[in-house]
Amino acid sequence: MSAAVYLLVGALVLAAAQAVGGGVTNCAWNEYDLSPLAAAGDVTGTDNLYQYTINVCGVVSEANCHARNGSMCQYDLNAPPAYKHELSDWVDGSGVWAECNDAVNCPKGGVTVSFANGDVCSPQLGARRVAYVIACAPDQTTFSTFQIISSVCNYTVLIQHQSGCGGPPRPPPVNCAGAGFDLTPLYGVDLTSNSALYQWRLSVCGSVATEVDCAAHNGSMCQYAEASPNVYRHVISKWDESASFSACSDPVLCPSGGANVSFANGDECMPGTPRTLNLIVACSDAVSTPRGAYNVTAIGPCAYQAVMSDPVGCPPPPPAPVTNCQYLDYDFSPLANSDLKSFTEPYNYRTCAH
């Protein structure tokens, strides 16, 4: 079936029910922050075949959609519109982010967030799928209109907004490796997590870039009160040269090993006592969805622990055995277990080992 393009002229819904929409989650990636779109709450529109309601980064307030954590739902055109299907769930963290390089939909750049977690369309085709495309539009500061491209079980939501332009590029990572671990693959994304009382933002190997208060204090992890919107409270850590790497030996948290990065440079908690953080990256064969998902617990007065699982937390392999490394009075063992690149041929060499 060929794709049909429908212009949806959205009606901005600023109902009090927005407050129960589940909060803003998974709303930033790299230099892109979609919280201005989230602040709009529910946006509804019709293509004269169906009505659609979307809530970027959140949950639609209509009761049926809300009960399913739906960020986009489809309705018929009855009065009142009757619920038909959930098309996407933003808050489960399964969204896949990517740069929008489509010259037609994103001529000035943009970002896409794709989901495959709507209601089942058919046993053969699986879940309904939605791709949110936020195209860079520097002068567009409000959000009340979107387009939709639909085909069987697939929906593409096109939004023109300045949040699709992103912010300034992040600086390079800081002090991102130690004790044989390299956390660079986790760099560049502000990671959010929710606990019973607080929300947290974490930027591995750098500073949070998508929330102004944390960014102003160079925080790599910040704490927020659970409110709508979340209210900044404290810097828990700053990722600088004082970050201390070690191996995680806790058999419960790191049964297969892991990395531990310790900080003692957060906001003052009691006179003369800074807030501290232990970031534990447990060894895992699989990458979590989203990557870098973590939980935070208080482990003492002014002390916090964040735990995630990722392949970068796996201990480095033991060095290969050193063999035949001496000749006469010459000892080449200092070069062992280092890959040496040839200047003239596209080969790597390893001295005294494999």
Image (cartoon, rainbow, N blue to C red):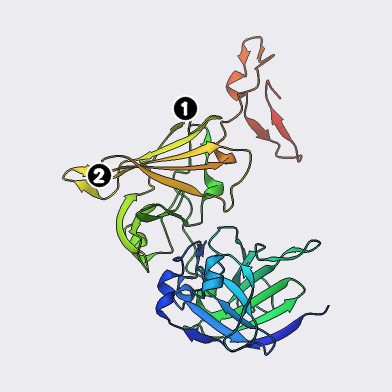
Give residue 342's position: percent from left, percent from top.
71, 36
Is residue 93 shown left or right of residue 206?
right
Q: Nearer the viewer, residue 175 or 289?
A: 289
Give residue 7's position: percent from left, percent from top.
65, 88
Residue flagged by tag 2: what amino acid is it?
Pro
Residue that appears at 31% across and 53% down = 235
Q: Is residue 211 visible?
A: yes
In this rendering, which labeled residue sits more in front, label 1 or label 2? 1
Give residue 35's position: percent from left, percent from top.
46, 70
Rendering quarter of residue 74 = bottom right
Q: Which residue is mark 1?
A: 249
Of pointers 1 and 2, the one earlier in the residue sequence = 1
Is residue 113 shown left or right of residue 178?
right
- Quadrant where the N terminus sits is bottom right
Give the class, few, some or many, for how many residues have Cα within 10 Å of label 2's Cα (few <14, many ≥20). some
Residue that appears at 60% across and 61% down = 95
Q: Which mark is residue 95?
A: none
Q: Nearer the viewer, residue 24 or 310?
A: 24
Residue flagged by tag 1: what amino acid is it?
Ser
Give residue 149's position: percent from left, percent from top.
70, 79
Which residue, as the protein is rendered here, is positioned at the far right?
1
Give the class, few, some or many, for how many residues have Cα within 10 Å of label 1's Cα (few <14, many ≥20). some
- In the rendered view, tell whether residue 80 sits above or below residue 226: below
- In the rendered view, tell whether residue 306 sits above or below residue 319: below
- In the rendered view, tell whether residue 300 sits above or below residue 225: above
Q: Nearer the viewer, residue 328 or 283?
A: 283
Q: Which mark is residue 274?
A: 2
- Quadrant where the C terminus sits is top right
Q: How far apart, in angstroms, are the residues tagged by discs 1 and 2?
A: 25 Å
Residue that appears at 34% across and 58% down = 224
